[in-house]
Amino acid sequence: MAALISCNCYSSLAASNSKCIGPALVPKGSSFLRTQNLPKFSPLKHAQCQLQNNEQQKGRPFSLKKSAISIVLAAELLINGIPSLDWSPNAYAANPPIPDLSVLISGPPIKDPGALLRYALPINNKAVREVQKPLEDISESLKIAGVKALDSVERNVRQASRALKQGKTLIVSGLAEAKKDHGVELLDKLEVGMEELQQIVEDRNRDAVASKQKELLQYVGDVEEDMVDGFPYEVQEEYRNMPLLKGRAAVDMKVKVKDNPNLEECVFRIVLDGYNAPVTAGNFVDLVQRHFYDGMEIQRADGFVVQTGDPEGPAEGFTDPSTEKTRTIPLEIMVDGEKAPVYGETLEELGLYKAQTRLPFNAFGTMAMARDEFENNSASSQVFWLLKESELTPSNANILDGRYAVFGYVTENQDFLADVKVGDVIESIKLVSGLDNLVNPSYKIAG
């Protein structure tokens, strides 16, 4: 397997004019021209009318406040052109007509995929979070120019060390019994590592800080995973026999890049989160084990998302050879504060306008399932990675959260996704950890 390569600066990609597949699925053979004789569709008007109809059907008065929220969301659909059937590069507006809508969205977003994965774990241990937070804040401290950043880093390290010393007993008590010895070993390594980071700061070696920070946060994340005692809930009965990822897994996706003299191939490490999306992640791991994606081309790369997963032939998804039918999976969204995901409905349809998703579209390289815009349970094999964060798709509050099922993040080489283009080839996607967490693996039944 190729080694993970380091990042350099490359130019951004132009929108693809080849096979157009949105985060929404596009029927094969369809094109932008097929819709030219249909009545013009207004996302803004449609959102308001649909909400009013839904409220009236449920016997509730129409809410202007909810209408305003839907119009904000629909405006983003209009501006960004997704999700939409018959997606076309022409769907983008040259000048967003409502640039000030972003002021309606507030809150400091977490954009680091590692941090998002740590906070998404089903644990509740305040002591370990108090160690985690100052170590993560080192990234902000390093944005200060020169060695002055080290003064701020030193405060971060001292805070984390103090939190570990004071909270170690509570952290150890939060470890799952079967994993306690491993967790304690990791905590010992974390203590030593923080002393080493303190020495790096005292030596004023700014260049060595980031790599040591990454090492320490890996220890923290591993300790937090050792706090998870088994899978925390029962998957909804109707989906219980599907391939399920009851935990986490990691894959390496090796992409052969064409027509780029600076980059021939790249390996992307992707962490899949089955704690919050067991059906979605399990489906993907099952397809990876079937080598479904190996040799497949990138089918969309427009500066907003990179997408693949549409097989050759008339089917828009994976055809299970044991049934000769297209396998589809439900929309699966874990709401922050809930114990199990909701299935089959968007958060907007559920009226959860202010709810936060446990796996948000915050990070560059957020991975999610593509589906038909009007069929929540139509996802099969097409996946996409988010590249862009516009003013109207701010982290932690955007049109994608609660509408598409996130099930992982690219954690290594994610910046290179911007250099992937239509026609580049996925040489392989290989599972590197987490196979033991896959249950009901259908790939073993039919190859």
Image: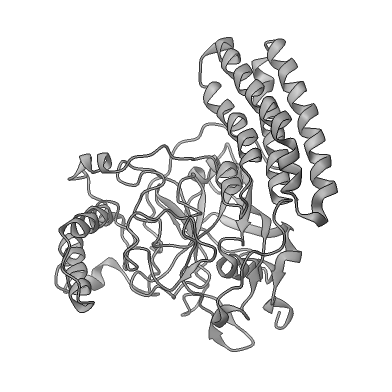
Measured as percent of width and height from the top left, residue 213 is found at: 67, 29
Quadrant for residue 209, please give it: top right
Q: Is residue 411 above or below residue 138?
A: below
Task: Using the image, determine if residue 139 lies above or below residue 276.
Answer: above
Q: Nearer the viewer, residue 372 or 361?
A: 361
By what rule are the colours in the image chosen? one colour
Q: Residue at x 66, y 39 (%)?
A: 5
> In the picture shown, does residue 37 fall above or below 12?
below
Quick check: 229 above or below 421?
below
Q: Is residue 213 left or right of residue 82?
A: right
Is 137 left, or right, of 83 in this rendering? right
Provide residue 152's location: percent of width, then percent of height: 57, 17
Q: Nearer the viewer, residue 199 or 261?
A: 199
Residue at position x 60%, y 18% from top? 155
Q: Quadrant of the C terminus?
A: bottom right
Where residue 248 appears, as percent x and y from the top left, is 67, 58
- Measured as percent of width and height from the top left, residue 273 is found at 60, 58
Q: Nearer the viewer, residue 69 or 317?
A: 69
How many numbered dots are placed on residues in this image?
0
Q: Quadrant of residue 185?
A: top right
Residue at 76% in and 65% down: 436
Q: Residue furthest bottom?
A: 323
Q: Is residue 281 left or right of residue 304?
A: right
Quarter of the image where one finds residue 283: bottom right
